[in-house]
Image (spheres, grey):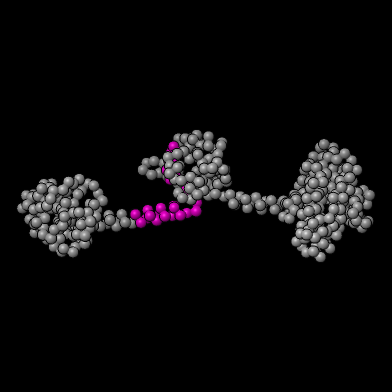
Amino acid sequence: MTSRIISGQPVLIIGAGRGGTALLEMFMEDNMASVVAIVDTNPDAPGFELARKYDIPTYTDAETALQACKEYSDCIIYNLSHDDAVAEIAREVFGDYRVTSGAEVKLFWQMVTNLKQIKVELEKSQDQLQAIIHNVMDGIITIDESGLIQGFNPAAERIFGYTSQEVAGKNVKLLMPEPERSAHDGYLHRYVHSQEKRVLGVRGREVLAVRKDGATFPMELSASEMSLGGQSYFIGIVRDITERKEAEDRIAHLAHFDYLTNLPNRASFLNILDHSVALSMRNKSMLAVLFVDLDGFKQINDTLGHEAGDLLLKGVSERFKQSVRDSDTVARLGGDEFIVLLQSIDNAESAGLLAEKLVKVLAEPFDLAGQAAKVGASIGISLFPDDASESRELVKQADEAMYVAKHSGKNIWKFYRDK
């Protein structure tokens, strides 16, 4: 055998079957031992193919291999051939008892086989875990006790816009907006030394986070602690909830605003009116409620269709909003009914002047997808505190005054006090 430079304990394997192959694989993965040769009487033994891959000499005769390995004076022989005569030959060649064979080598082979199986299972479990971490929709961020990022999965990369290489070893507070960013180190330090919790153990906590481009966004965070190798680590499961929050905002908006005109709806208007009545009571000021019913809307809806009717209602709402002050409120109660709240007016005549203005702004025809159409308005007016001091009563009185106006000729307005 040509002398080879080796690192680790020299080893000779006799037997290139399953046991010898497994032993060879184990030694090739460990720098503590170097296989100097492998022997088997079968030239097609599976261990030979693996040995040739690593340029390890192969022999079909044990004595020849032992003679060739004499230069490695501290060589250890593993006899997996079931041939006890090999031990005698080794003693003759090396002059001592350095052969592991029989029950010892069988036990060793079983240990190697079991360890190899455990290793395969561990690698499989690790691969499965890594596959899960890399493919989950939620971001997974791992930090150490100092707040430095140790793990950042692909979902976290997509959420924040950073690559894992860009954030590795950096403080996790770079993902936080102020004032959380400045407070984070202090919080982490307090937890490590006093176990005072603020976020840990809370599932689905809503927080604000910062992307790489500086944009903030709502995020759901679940944080927990784990111990590994005597060190504490913190794991954050994060989810971008921008779409969910936008949907919630839309639902909340629809609960208070008309879906077609985006004006406050009845419930929202009554809340505004309650607040305004209370404010006017304290300030001893006057306010007015104008109940508006469109004249001629049903005919347009029936002849031109509901799409045209919707366009008309949108057009009416825009003209009404442009006719009042910023402090006043225009709302749609439903159908072709609108209601207007005038805050802090000087006298009843101010309400009458606005009613006249609303009738006039409707005089100009509306363009409904190329077709011209006109509507009028019947308006009823109630006053606080002259007519009532309670919100719903004011609305009811303005509604009654509107019906008087409608039966009095349309395109006119009536005060509740004059009905």
Left of 377 or right of it: where is 125?
Answer: left
Compare residues 128 and 316 and report the one nearer the observer: 316
Q: Residue at x 82, y 36 (%)?
A: 283
Residue 410 in the image: state x and y as whole percent. Answer: 90, 56
Q: In the picture, residue 297 is in which quadrant? A: bottom right
Residue 84 in the image: state x and y as whole percent. Answer: 10, 59
Q: Is residue 228 visible?
A: yes
For the record, the magenta segment spans: 122-151
Residue 135 in the image: state x and y as whole percent. Answer: 46, 54
Q: Please tell me whether residue 74 is drawn above or below residue 83 in the rendered image.
A: above
Q: Please tell me whether residue 374 is drawn above or below residue 324 in the rendered image.
A: below
Q: Residue at x 13, y 60 (%)?
A: 60
Compare residues 156 and 320 and report the one nearer the observer: 320
Residue 86 in the image: state x and y as whole percent. Answer: 10, 57
Q: Is residue 149 magenta?
A: yes
Q: Is residue 8 magenta?
A: no
